[in-house]
Structure formats: C-alpha cells, structure tokens
Amino acid sequence: MYCRNCGKKMKKDALFCGNCGMPVDGVNKKSLAGEKNSIWKVIMIIFSISVIMATAVSIVKLGYQVYKQKVLLEQKKPIYKEIYAGVNGKKYGYFLNEDGERIYDGIEGPDTNGNFIVRQGEKYGLVNEEGIEVIKPVYRMMEELSVEDTDKEGVYLVWKENKCGVITMDNACLVEEQEGQIEKVSIEQQLYKINLGGGDTQIRDFQGNIIIQGKNGDVDLLPNGCIKDYESGNIMTRDGTVLLYQQDETGLLEQIECFSDDKIGAGISYARRLDDIQVKKGLLTLDGKIRFPCLYDQIYYISDKDVFFYSKDQKTGVMKSTGEILWEQDYDFGFVFLTEDRKRTEDAMLVKRGGNYGLVDIKTGKTEIECEYSYISKDSQNEKSWFWKKGEKSGFWNQKNGTYVEIPYKGGGSIEGFHSGSDSEIIYVYDYSMGDFLRIHEENGTGVIDREGNYVIEPKYSYISYDKYNKLFLAVMGGQTNVLNLHGQALVPWLPYDQILWNDNLIFTEIENETYCFDYSGKYITASKYTVKNILEEGDIDENFNQLFLIEENKNSFKN
C-alpha cells in the first residue's frame, strides 16, 4: 500500500503515512478527532482514579498517625526518678507509674548503654533508657560486661539457677546457660572464656567447641578475641598463630592494649622495652592489614577521624593507616580529648613542647594556640571553650571566634583545671566535679570561685567538692565534714562523720552506727539505727520512736 499524497510505501494496517502524515483512505478528520477524544477520556479517567487512590491512602495514613499518637498518649511510659546521693556521684533511681508508685523492687543503672537492670522479687531483667522493658525479670542474676571483658557494647551475663549464659540488650542469646562462670566474651571472634572451678579454664566458641584449655589461669581471652598464653607470654589468634612473641629482636613485651573498631577491625597497641631506658610502642590489626613497628613514643588510632596520631623522636604527627604522613611538627607529645559521650574526639589536640602546651588541629596540624601555656584543658561545661594558664593568669579561649578572656581572680592562689594530666594518649574532662565553678588553692586552704573570679566558698577548707545536681558542696576541715549551700552556710553540725550523703532535699549523716537526718535548712528531723544505704534504697523504719517513717525518694517527704 502506497500513500496517495507522497507516494511512499506504508504498512497494510497504517492509519497515517509515516513520511508525510497524510491519513489513509477511510480515516477522516472527524473519526480522528473522535479517536483523540476517546484517548483523552481514558487518560482523564486513569488520572482521576490515581488522584482518588492517593487521597484515600493519605487519609488512611493520617488516620493511622492520629490513632498511633492517641495510643502513645494513652500508654504512658514509666517515669524514671533519679536521686543523686552525695558528691561521690552515687545514684539511686526508681521507675514510677503515673500514681507515683515504684514499678520494680530494685534498680541498678543507668549502665554505659543507658539501660537499667531491674529486680522484681528475686528475678532480674532489663529496661532501656525510654522506660521500656526489653528483657523481662526472669534471671536469678544479671550483669553488664565491661569494656575490659568484651569488644562490643550491650552484652550481659545472665544466670538461671546455677548456670551462666550471655545475651545482648536486644535479648539475643549468644551463649546458652551452662555450668561454670563465664568471664569474658568476644563478639567479633565469637569466643568466650569460662571458669569451670578447680582451676580449670576453657576458651570456647559460641557453639561450645573447646578452642584451648588451661589450668590455674594460664590462658586468658582478651576483649578483642586474642588469646594470651601466660606460660609462654605470647599473644595468639584463635587458631594458634602467634601475633606477638613475649621476646623478639626488638625487646621484651611489657604492655598490651586491645581495641576493636568498626573501621579497621580488632587489633593491639603494645609496648616493648628496648633497654633499661627506652620503651617504644607499636600497633597491629588481627587481619594483618595494619602493622606499625615498635618505633613510637605514642601511637593512637582516632576512630572518628580515621587517622593515627603519633610521637617519635620529639616530633608529633598524624598519618593514615597506610603510613602516609598528613603532617608532622616539632612537638614532644600529643594528647586527644574525648567528647562527653566518649565516642568522638575534639577537633583540636593538645601538644607539648618542653614544659609548655598548645593546641593544633588534628587533621591539618594548623596551630590553634601557640605552645606558650603552662596548662590547657577542654572546658567541660562549654562546647567550644578551653581553659588556659599562663604565669599567674588563667582564663578561657573561645575556639569559635578565637577570643581570650582572663578570669579576674585576685586572690593570689592557683585555679585548678579540668584534668590533672593523663598517663595515656587520651584525656576525659567530663567527670570534673565542680560544674560551672572553679576550685582554688590559697595559703589558708581550698575554696571555690565562679567564672568571673568572685568567691563562692572562702578558701579555708582542706578539701571541697561540688554536687551539681543538688547544688551543694561537700567540705572537709580539720578532720570534720559538712555540707554547704551556695552561700557557704553549713547545713549540719561539724563532726567527724563516718558517712554523709543526701538526696534532693534531705541530708543523712552516719556516726558511730547512728544515722541522723536533716533537711536543707539544717533542721534536725530524726535519728535511726539504720544505715544511710538502707535509708536511701529501702526506706527507714525508726524503732527508737516506735513509729514508722518511710522516706519516699520520689516524693521527697516523710509519712508517719
């Protein structure tokens, strides 16, 4: 078939010429218009159906969200009430329902993961930081494994009857309950160490197969899954391959520190004694991909920045895992500051040259503060603030805008900083006990000033510390102890107490096995034969007065 207009050949069932677009015979404009209209009608119908369906889905989603919010509002989570008892930071906590009643008989925590081990009767379970019970109280005993005993967070030992097992905070069972005492667990290598009694120790895999066994503690499982043979002193992998010999051509193995990192994997930082004076450090990973020989005075992996910082031959620098040096400068040593959550590091690191300190940017080596200061520390109270000392002056440096502010303190003493140095490459300042205040040392004793240099507590005490939660000071003078308010007023009699603790409105003192209770105004309330620990954890029954005094920590009141 050929087009009548241009003469080009067309397919038999063609409606139009593919060359000039002319309709074939029998296809007129009216029928074409109808065809087009039909097509548009179909398109509009499909579009309308799509809009209706989308609207319906949105309505259903909105309805579900409203319902979900309603359910969440109706299902109120337990309230966690914390009581900070004394300046030592001991915390007593309770989960309360909406009526203010305790939900559990006992509670420990929060632990390093923010979870709470709770007790109901004689059984233990786990509640997360949101107050949700993630593990029901079914165990005879429950204990979190510390970083010295495992390579991952959120790992717990549990006991049923006299058998010990391992679970995670998500209630995943890693090792079934079995006879013996499990002591250490490596999640990465799927190994655990178990003490069977009588001096017998085994290291097993998660399926229960024995990897190695010993007597009287002559084998040990390190937290990253390495095995230490105490008889030879060597460090081995699970298949017996020696990673580090006790003695090699470099020197005697003196110290090891295990690590397990998501980026570079598990490894060991170690030190060897080269001679009577020199001790050098090295580092390796278990997979053999990274190995730095024992040449360094310091070497430390900064995980959040994926670099290694080191010092060697009075030079400090930063390098990649390949050994490529990013920067190196003339500093004797370096130190990194951990952030409050301990999971990251500050962008600036402390460097030392001679007897003075400065700050440099970790990644670039750019100088932030010259090495001219006798002391520099991260400010534990303000994110971009650093505390410094230079001669008799002290103050703060703002990392954000680069300004220096001197503390106008004229007392002639010294202002204590936020840390007292470090034996390792890392410094943590967030356990500083003075809050927004600064401890000072003068000729007559120790006192407290604010950040503007004003006296808060006169410098006449042998020791003073601060409870930032309840805003009280613990003071010691001449062997006697007291609690002071923000005005320096003593709240209890000065006596050589055996123990002194407080919650958020009551002070408990213990002397010669007698406990005395005072309120924050210093008013004496009652005496008891019960210890301070009994009062804070269980309540106090005062038999001396033949009355029942129940101290309800959640309501800060007495009932009799």
Image (cartoon, grey):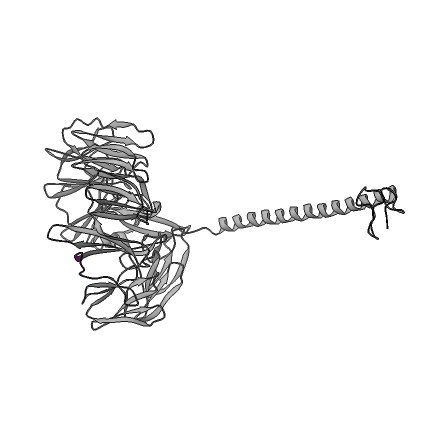
500 vs 246: above or below:
above
Q: What percent of the width, then of the height, locates residue 66?
A: 56, 47
Residue depicted at 68% across the width and 45% down the height: 51
Is residue 245 part of the magenta span, yes or no? Answer: yes
Does residue 539 appear anywhere in the picture? no
Q: Please state if 152 lies on the left or on the right of 87 as rendered.
A: right
Position in image of residue 251 (x %, y %): 16, 57
Q: Quadrant of residue 489?
A: top left
Judging depth in this view, the residue of 135 and 356 nearest the camera is 356
Residue lying at 27% horizontally and 34% vertically, measured from the top left: 386
Q: Is residue 246 magenta?
A: yes
Residue nearer the viewer, 358 or 179:
358
Location of residue 69 with respect to 471 vertically, above or below: below
Residue 65 place in picture, x, y as percent: 55, 48
Q: Quadrant of residue 189?
A: bottom left
Task: List the single residue furthest toward the right.
Answer: 26
Taking depth in this image into account, of 539 and 447 the one nearest to the observer is 447
- In terms of secondary structure, what is the magenta stretch mainly? loop
Q: Is residue 500 toward the left or the right of residue 383 in the image?
A: left
Magenta part of the chain: 244-252
Q: Residue at x 10, y 33 (%)?
A: 444
Residue 256 in view (yes/no): yes
Answer with left or right where residue 288 lies relative to residue 527.
right
Q: x, y (%) of residue 19? A: 80, 43
Which residue is at the front of the view, 320 or 31? Answer: 320
Locate residue 138: give its quadrant: bottom left
* Residue 311 versus residue 404 in the image, above or below: below
What is the total number of numbered labels drawn onto the structure image?
0
Q: Residue at x 26, y 42 (%)?
A: 317
